[in-house]
Image: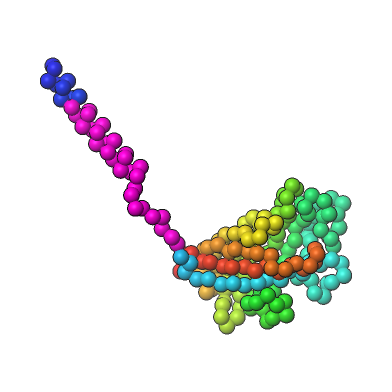
Amino acid sequence: MRAGSRNVNLLFFFFFFFFMLLALSLAHPGNYKKKQYKPCKELVLYFHDILYNGKNAANATSAIVAAPEGANLTILAPHNNHFGNIIVFDDPVTLDNNLHSSPIGRAQGLYIYDTKNTFTAWLGFTFSLNSTQHRGTINFMGADPILINTRDIPIVGGTGDFFMHRGIATIMTDAFEGLVYFRLRVDIKFYECW
């Protein structure tokens, strides 16, 4: 009986020692480096948004389509960081920051002011590009904390030259004029290209 129990103890000790060595080797991986992903394609584009204010119908590229109770659809809600406003847009997309440059496509979608206690919006839009350099669409969706200088939103797909592409768009407010005009610089990095 003693020899059998001794063998069991020895076997238990062997397995315990083996698993401890395994656990220690996994806890300290040595020279393991996290894989650094490099973009497979990069673009820098600008889009220009001119909000309809009741007087600029000929030049406006966006409009308020929903507002909090008691607000009108020609000015953004003055309180609570524009909370509750929903704006749709069809903005020109250019290769540089000049509003009067030839557009290479359109930015089409919506943004929703969705937070009461800070100035932020939720974006869902598509760049529809139709130029000699780029043909197809790029789809964006995510939160835009407007008060932060650079913010990232996910690229969730695309068509044409950007078929099934995914990545990150770093957006920066490049210019703004009151509540009527703003220009965004969109630095696009694709990490999945088909």
* Residue at 55% in and 62% down: 168
Residue 1: x, y in percent? 13, 16
Relative to 129, residue 72 above or below: above
Viewer can see residue 121: no
**Prevailing secondary structure class for the magenta stretch in the rendered image:** helix
Residue 125: x and y in percent read 65, 64
Residue at 38% from the left image edge and 55% from the top image edge: 33
Q: Which residues are magenta?
A: 10-37
Residue 144 visible in the current orientation: yes
In the rendered image, which quarter is residue 64 located in?
Answer: bottom right
Looking at the picture, the colour scheme in use is rainbow
Q: Nearer the viewer, residue 161 or 13?
A: 13
- Image spot of residue 188 (x, y percent): 56, 67
- Quarter of the figure with residue 136: bottom right
Mark count = 0
- Name the outermost residue toward the top: 1
Identify the image quadrant of residue 171.
Answer: bottom right
- In the image, residue 95 lies in the stretch drawn in magenta: no
The structure residue drawn at horizontal position 24% and vertical position 36%, both measured from the top left corner, is: 18
